[in-house]
Image (tube, rainbow, N blue to C red):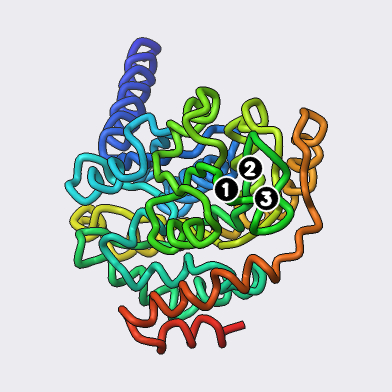
Amino acid sequence: MKSLKSFSRVIAVFCLIAVSHVSHAQAIRLRLAHSGAEAETQHAAALEFAKQVKSKTNGQIEVQVYPASTLGNDNTAIAAVRGGTIDMTTSGTPYYTGMVGRMNVLDLPYIFANADHAYKVLDGSIGRGLLDELEANNLKGLAYWEVGFRSLTNSRRPVRTPDDIKGLKVRTTPNPAHIKAFQIFGANPTPMPLAEVFTAMENKAIDGQENPVGIVRGNKFNEVQKYMSLTKHAYTAMPVVINKAKFSSLTATQQQALIDAAIAAGSFQRDLIRKTEASDLAYLKANGMQIEENINSEPFRKLVADPIKQMFSEKYGTQLVDAVVNAR
């Protein structure tokens, strides 16, 4: 009788192990690649997303996060998601505008009065509609995370006025609005992947770059840049996308869980950015950067806002621009 009980316990243990293995084998694994450094809020949002997805699907879906361009730069990752070799990615809107030109409206200089204005657009029908336009490119947009308001760093001189930008070789995104803005400022805009920027500045191939404060700190740009100016000349959103066919293969409940998790992770990141920007600035100052905080944005705005808005409107009409401006 005793041996029978022992045998029963052994069988029970094996059954539990078997069930565990079956459950583990049935878990859907999604690979999410992004270009942000592990110290950036983008990576924190990705980890929060993975946590939320596992919780909301009761472990049916697990998200594996690959930061810092591990699986390729922004363009490479987006192409891989479209082709299905990577499941998910998140990149700034400039990397999607080649597919959905109307999305470039989100990157126009000074189009957003503040973060709340941007969030109202992104979280409303305008933002959702632009995400839906990605589906023609085999991408399903889940939500927007954040790159943030862009500011300028360089290694040559303080930038207090637009004239101070003249002659600088500045890394920009490949976005037409960003490139045109720096051409108007008299700079030499030089698009390149984020992963190459530190080395390019270190080797003096470029003089500077333009990104939010958190990205400057997260990528240690202060080690190769002396000056920073809080120009906040443009805002950049960060669509979170999944391969459309992969998304369609999930149940309706799993699909909604991914959307809800992406939205929740976006809110988490926005809060994190608000909480850390002051400490990021303090860190950069303490580590040698000279920061121009009280920039008069009006001379910058006067030069670039209307011409680039006009450039967009000539191609796509004024309705979308007006809707974004009036959404505040």
Disc ID at residue 117: none
Instruction: Locate the N terminus and report the quarter of the image it occupies.
Output: top left
Q: Nearer the viewer, residue 48 or 203?
A: 203
Where is residue 259 drawn, in percent x and y?
41, 62
Instruction: Residue 119: tell me if it is visible.
Output: no
Which residue is the site of mark 2?
153
Between marks 3 and 1 in the image, the one whose residue lies nearer the viewer: 1
- The answer to whether the residues at label 2 and label 1 have Cβ atoms under 8 Å apart is yes
Mark 3 vs 2, N-terminal side: 2
Residue at (61% x, 35% y) in the render: 218
Residue 313 image position (x, y, % from top left): 38, 81
Q: 71 left or right of 68?
A: left
At numbered mark 2, what does the secondary structure look like: helix, strand or loop? strand
Q: CA distance from mark 3 to mark 2?
A: 22 Å
**What kind of element bears circle 3?**
helix
Alpha carbon of mark 2 to alpha carbon of mark 1: how far?
A: 8 Å
- Image quadrant where residue 74 sits: top left
The amino acid sitting under disc 3 is Leu
Q: Which mark is residue 272?
A: 3
Of circles 3 and 2, which is in front? 2
Provide residue 16's location: percent of width, then percent of height.
36, 29
Pinpoint residue 190: horizontal percent, then vertical percent: 42, 44
Judge left or right: residue 213 versus residue 171: right
Give the residue pinned by disc 1: 211
Type of the residue with mark 2: Thr
Q: Is residue 203 above or below residue 150?
A: above
Q: Place residue 77 in its image quadrant.
A: top left
